[in-house]
Amino acid sequence: MAMIVCAECDCTIEHFKAEKMATLYGNCEACKKKRASR
């Protein structure tokens, strides 16, 4: 787990590498794609 800054939406978001865990993404297209690909 790490707090990272999404380069696309320029927001600090908690990204969980383990797919089994809940993952929070921002509202940018890149984050939407990541969320959809889970």
Image (tube, rainbow, N blue to C red):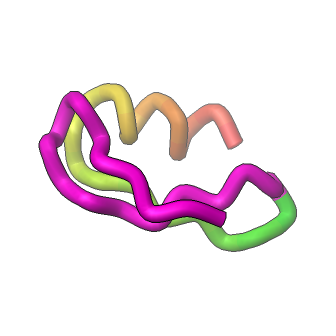
Q: Residue at x 22, y 49 (%)?
A: 27
Q: Residue at x 24, y 31 (%)?
A: 7
Q: Is residue 29 above or below residue 36?
A: above
**Front-most of residues 8 and 4:** 4
Q: Is residue 36 above or below residue 19?
A: above
Q: Quadrant of the C terminus?
A: top right
Q: Is residue 6 above or below residue 20?
A: above
Q: Quadrant of the N terminus?
A: bottom right
Q: Return the x and y of residue 4 as percentages of the image width and height.
A: 40, 52
Q: Is residue 26 left or right of residue 14?
A: left
**Front-most of residues 20 and 12:** 12
Q: Return the x and y of residue 21 as percentages of the image width and height.
A: 77, 70
Q: Residue at x 29, y 48 (%)?
A: 5
Numbered range of the magenta stretch: 1-19
Q: Is residue 32 left or right of residue 7?
A: right
| Outermost residue, bottom side | 22
Q: Quadrant of residue 30?
A: top left
The number of discs equals 0
Q: Is residue 6 above or below residue 14?
A: above
Q: Is residue 5 left or right of residue 23?
A: left
Q: Quadrant of residue 28?
A: top left
Residue 5 lies in the magenta-colored region: yes
Q: Residue at x 26, y 60 (%)?
A: 12
Q: Return the x and y of residue 16 as percentages of the image width and height.
A: 65, 60
Residue 33 lies in the magenta-colored region: no
